[in-house]
Amino acid sequence: MTDSLDALIHARVLAVVRAPTAESALLAADALVAGGVFGLEITYSTPDACAVIRELDARYGDRIHLGAGTVTTPSEATQAADAGARFLVSPGTRRELTAAMKDTGLVVLTGALTPSEVMAAVEYGTDVVKIFPASLGGPAFLKSLRGPFPDVALMPTGGVTPDNLTDWFDAGAVAVGAGGDLVSGADLATGRYDEVERKARLFAAAGARA
């Protein structure tokens, strides 16, 4: 578990891939890796998400840090683990779901926004609390959470850009999640994977500086 958590922290940036098709998810992943972003979160809103995870695991192995996102049921947690995911991400925090995610033995990230939700996530045993949507409060909000929760691993998702990435890490993030600002729906819909790669290079460079 420690090694897996270290790998997530080392990845710095987790690209949240919400693709309209399995093929576009794979092409987006290839573009992200080419651009230097090696943390990949394939969401269950992507068709055939487990098939995508299985293919990426076979294609890249330990070169990437691969996980499943938008996990909302215990069965999805099990399926993603079987497909080769190394971490599981839920947009919210529920006791039964968190327990099922932890039963896989993978690193578990569950979503929270308020202090009470962070406390619940910690109580249920999550490894990393995903602050979502982090855009609502920005880095200043994350820094405020650091006060009462100095030892909790926090990962903001939403509102993270290359320009403010350093601010998030300075505020106490252990890693960041980047969705539309890195892998936009418009770019995927129009097949602009070169643009995905370009943005990945910007995020990778900012992550290296942070």
Image (cartoon, rainbow, N blue to C red):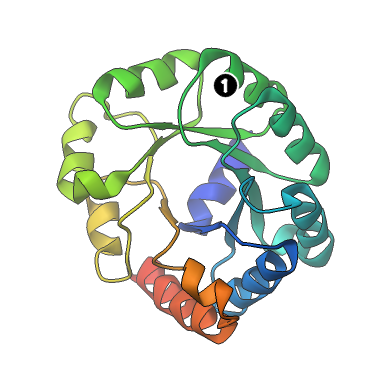
| Depicted 33 relative to depicted 169: above or below | below
Q: Residue 158, image x and y in percent? A: 35, 52
Q: Secondary structure at mark 1?
A: helix
Residue drawn at (23%, 41%) of the image: 142
Q: Disc 1 marks which residue?
A: 98
Percent x, y for residue 72?
59, 30
Q: The N terminus appears in which quarter of the rendering?
A: top right
Residue 126 in sight here: yes
Say which quarter of the image contains residue 206.
bottom left
Answer left or right for 90 relative to 33. left
Q: Nearer the viewer, residue 111 or 103?
A: 111
Q: Quadrant of the C terminus?
A: bottom left
Judge whether 201 appears above or below 69 on screen.
Answer: below
How far across and down, in percent of the image, does residue 143 sit? 19, 41
- Seen at 82% across and 38% down, the residue is 82
The image quarter containing residue 122 is: top left
